[in-house]
Amino acid sequence: MNRNHLTFSLQFSVLPILLCLFVTVQAHADPYQDCILEAIEQLSDERTVGEIRALCEPKIPTPIRSEPIGLIEKRLKLEREASSNRFAMTQHKSSYMLPLSYNSRVNNTPFTDAGQESDLSDYEVKFQLSVKAQVFDSIMRQRGRIFVAYTNQSYWQLYDQENSAPFRETNHEPEIFADFDYDKNLGGWHIPLVRGGWVHQSNGRSDPLSRSWNRIYAQIFLEKEKWALSFKPWIRVNGDSADVDNPDIDEFMGNFELGIFRQGNSSSASLLLRNNLRSENRGALELNWSKELPYSSKVRFLFQYFYGYGESLIDYNVLTNRVSVGLQLSDFL
């Protein structure tokens, strides 16, 4: 068999699959169909149907609505464009580096209870890195996508040189979740997206400093002009740590998180709230404000204030009062 005949045979065998894909998306506008047809004409034996679909999905036009596109839809559009690159990973939660972080309520108790000498500094470095990757796309009639994500949050006693500047605490948070396009309105707010997932959080230590828990959650996003809201209730999933590491973590972390976001021309702000809604009331708030820096289109100045319980797992049951400043590597939305 010569090379031309082999190429023709390969195209002929894959063509029915691509035509089925083409038929299922006839409701979309021409740019998407044109992209599929062009990909068929330029088909190579190294390109899969999934890669062609990921390449062409950003060309699906956003449904025309009378109101302007919202903050969440803008981010979704950028993520879809990035998903055509199989090596791309996008932000999940905000990523930042806060080299000056002051905590007025340093918690030495877990370390002294473990038999370790502890004289922690009030000042440390706090940083968070959070990324996600899309593993399945176009599920549920092309309205859903499945992601895996990982968030690392660390507290580094950089200024405690007498004790070799240890990492006081590092929390690992792997996650798997599904996003579904919704496109509904509620009380003047647009609902572009709903989410459901499972998340594990652990500090990776052995007893008696071990802390961990598992949750399943649902999350709804709303947007209106320069504002966005997020409501995220969860249920704890019992595991080996439920009765050992931190059996009462729900009493301090609560069962939901409310996020409020606003994006201005050169600055952005977010407020995250948690509460246990019990008579012995406990919760937390985290305020973030970021500002564009001159000569930088990506990195921003970030001010962060946290007050309450559960900033980190080692301090889940201790009231924390922290002020931090530094650089934001990726925005809230």
Image: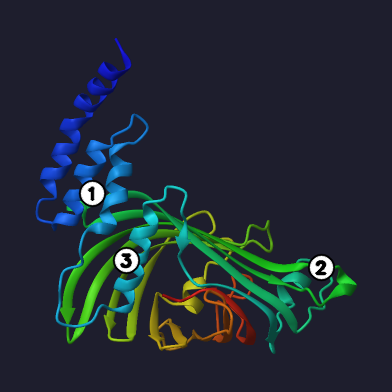
Please name the amino acid that badge 2 sits on: Gln
Q: Secondary structure at mark 2?
A: loop
Please name the amino acid that badge 1 sits on: Cys
Q: Is residue 190 left or right of residue 210?
A: left
Q: Residues within 10 Å of mark 3 (few under 14, many from 20)?
A: some
Q: Nearer the viewer, mark 2 or mark 3?
A: 3
Q: Position of residue 306 (x, y in %)?
A: 56, 86
Q: Residues within 10 Å of mark 2 (few under 14, many from 20)?
A: few
Disc number for residue 35:
1
At horizontal 25% and vertical 51% (from top left) the residue drawn is 138
In front of the other: 14 or 236:
14
Specify which label sits upstream in the sequence, 2 or 3: 3
State whether residue 242 appears in this view: no
Q: Quadrant of residue 224?
A: bottom left
| Pointer 3 residue | 77
Specify which label sits upstream in the sequence, 2 or 1: 1
**How far is disc 2 from disc 3 in space, using C-alphas?**
50 Å
Disc number for residue 116:
2
**How far is disc 3 from disc 1 in space, using C-alphas?**
17 Å
Q: Quadrant of residue 109?
A: bottom right
At horizontal 55% and vertical 86% (from top left) the residue drawn is 308
Q: Position of residue 316 (x, y in %)?
A: 58, 75
Q: Nearer the viewer, mark 2 or mark 1?
A: 1
